[in-house]
Image (spheres, coloured by chain):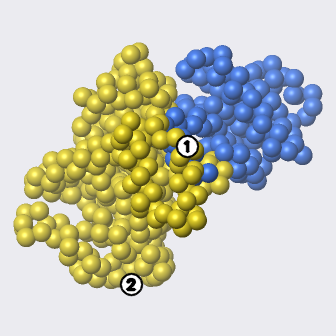
Chain colours: A yellow, B blue
Amino acid sequence: MRLVEAVLNGDRLALARLLTQVEQGTPAGLKALDMLFQHTGKAYLIGVTGSPGSGKSSLVNRLVYALRHPIGDASPKRVAVIAVDPSSPFSGGALLGDRVRMRDLAGDAGVFIRSMASRGNLGGLARATVSSAQVLDAAGFEVILIETVGAGQAEVDIARLADTILVVGTPGMGDEIQAIKAGILEIADILVINKADQPGVEEAEQFLRMMVETALTQKDTDDEGKRWSPPIVRTIALRGEGVQNLLDVIQQHAAHLENSGQSQERVRHRLEYDLINRVQERLLARWWGEVAEAAFREMLERIYRREISPCQAAEQLVEVTNQL
Amino acid sequence: MLVEQIALEFGMRERKIRVLIAKPGLDGHDRGAKVVARALRDAGMEVIYTGLRQTPEMIAEAALQEDVDAVGLSILSGAHLALAPRVVALLRAQGQERVSVFVGGIIPNEDIPLLLQAGVKAVYGPGVSTSKIAEEIRQYVAAVSDEIVR
């Protein structure tokens, strides 16, 4: 397949077009994914999540810039960004504005930024985000940053995709810190307090420290070597302050995963999650192909009339296709 | 209907039209660009908004990475004859022959034929309805998809 070869040879237009195919789930896109899979597994995936307006895009902008302009003799990494924004549930359209904050990265051939609409998927990512990350991985990007939609408590899919997860909050907004407290704090590998020049940063850090020490105990294991308490890092993304330190902490986390054997574990989990998703997708597609729409509508009416429970109805609808 | 949506998602996924909206040049008036961006979103398109003061090179590169079907340029500075043809030329040089470019803003009537000659698909001045813009973009994209089998 020409598109696959071109992508492996670093052709950016081919890469962009393949990402579209993959996002649409076309036969060509799926075929390409199969062919590219053996080239994946090399990239380091960093997830960036947190409440809307916390400065995720600005932070990604700075992190990528720092990776492209390393201090000392380190060679710059090739970096890709996937920025996910929500689709409108009404029109199905989307306004993808993360690039506005990433203008420092323009004109750098070592950077590739792709905006994705969530297309109705819950969980903070788009359905095709996993596949898109695989394509970018195969295309030779060494670091892939994935920015989720502005997330509250439930958008934790990124936990199953990334190696290191940054949860970004801001000071001065007690409610906002509250809003990110439950599920999303538990997935954090590193907690970032962005806009750290704003008042309330001490309180925010204290609060987060308390959360780390109490709510996150479930993440602890008996295995000393695997234990990782999420560090709290202050940044001012607009001015680039604290960004180098954040990169250092990310590297420490990467080293911790490596030394404790957890990086293998994470990869296994990621693949397992991906497999389950693809099985679900296939089963549903097959079922939808086989069930008669009229039968489905009829069942819906019967539920509406309270003649049958949704549970029984589902059971019967699935049985119909089993008999085929 | 919910079930159609799910079927679409899982079976044949819909081809979404992707549009890049950019403001090249130095004027800082982005109201029009934002109105059009929002209208196209409400028409079901995925709109990548890149913000103010973009160079033609930045716009062409963003259009490439995002694999858009159309690029909308909002220009109120009077520099449209320099900026728009440059964006078209850069897109074509990158191999993006299929991308339709349209221009909005304050464009004198006598300049419109020059822009069209340079490869701009359409020019939308003040007062054009956003639904007309959405409809025409849809037509351009459909025409191109017929022409080139992906």
Query: Mark 1 highlights which residue?
Result: A293
Residue toward you, A226 or A193: A226
Q: Could you say where residue B137 lies in the image, as x and y percent from the top left?
A: 73, 33
What is the chain identity of the residue bearing mark 1? A
Residue with the most extreme right position:
B109
- Relative to A316, say whether A131 is above or below: above
Q: Secondary structure at mark 1?
A: helix
Residue toward you, A78 or A324: A324
Residue B5 visible to an observer of this rendering: no
Screen quadrant of the N terminus of chain A: top left
Q: Could you say where residue A234 lies in the image, as x and y percent from the top left?
A: 36, 69
Residue visible at 71% across and 37% down in the picture: B72
Mark number displayed over residue A203: 2
Q: CA distance from mark 2 to mark 1?
A: 56 Å
Residue visible at 27% across and 34% down in the picture: A40
- Relative to A132, say whether A166 is above or below: below
The three-letter code of the residue at mark 2 reads: Glu
Q: Could you say where residue A240 lies in the image, as x and y percent from the top left?
A: 43, 58
